[in-house]
Amino acid sequence: MATKIPKTTPLPNRTGGADSVVLERQPQRTRPPQMHHVVLLNDDFTPMEFVVLVLQEFFNKDREAATQIMLKIHLEGRGVCGVFPRDIAATKVDQVLDAARQAGHPLQCIHEPIE
Ligand code: TYC
């Protein structure tokens, strides 16, 4: 009768022994998505009320916060409306520009990577 030779398949969780295997930690390969600011720019023609409505509709601001942001843009030239991954930021920009053009306002909106 043949003698059975025990199988010694190297397993990651074996400890010790000449045929034991040590797995090295792999460096992290995925990075969190780069975030973008969506920024509204001031102009002399878009009504303040329209900007407030845009901030409420597309950036989920309450009326108070929307008014503060609108005034900051009016006084400083630009203001951040929200922070999103790039694709969502691009969609927000499209939504704002579509709404502004439909209403006949020259409002400008951009997105830019943070840092
Ligand atoms: N400056 C505009 C006005 O006086 C108001 C305004 C605010 C326009 C913010 C654009 O992103 C803007 N009617």
Image: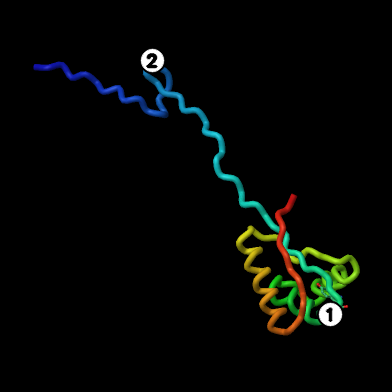
Residue 47 higher or lower than 70, as above or below: below
**Label 2 beta carbon less than 8 Å to ligand 1:** no
Q: Earlier in the sequence, mark 1 or mark 2?
A: 2
- Rendering quarter of residue 63: bottom right
Nearest the camera: 49 or 2?
49
* Left or right of 3, for residue 33: right
The quarter of the image that holds ligand 1 is: bottom right
Q: Residues within 10 Å of mark 2 (few under 14, many from 20)?
A: few
- Residue at the (43%, 22%) spot, across then down: 15
Helix, strand or loop under label 1: loop
Residue type for callout 1? Phe
- Of the pair 83 and 102, the residue shown nearer to us: 102
Q: Position of residue 67 (x, y in %)?
A: 83, 75
Q: Which residue is mark 2?
A: 18
Mark 1 CB lies closer than 8 A to ligand 1: yes
The residue lying toward the viewer, choosing from 99 and 84, is 99
Q: Position of residue 115 (x, y in %)?
A: 75, 49
45 to the left or right of 27? right
Name the kind of residue labelled 2 in the image.
Answer: Ala
Which structural element holds mark 2? Answer: loop
**Spatial CA span between label 1 and label 2:** 78 Å
- Tell us which disc is closer to us: 1 or 2: 1
Judging by the rendered image, the residue that carries numbered circle 1 is 45
Residue at (80% x, 73% y) in the render: 66
Q: What is the residue that sits farthest to the right in this orientation? A: 75
Q: Residue at x 74, y 68 (%)?
A: 109
Q: Quadrant of the N terminus?
A: top left
Residue located 76% across and 66% down the image:
81
Residue 1 vertical placement versus 80 (above, below): above
User: Can you give x and y, in whole percent of width and height, for residue 41 in the image?
Assistant: 80, 68
Q: How many marks?
A: 2
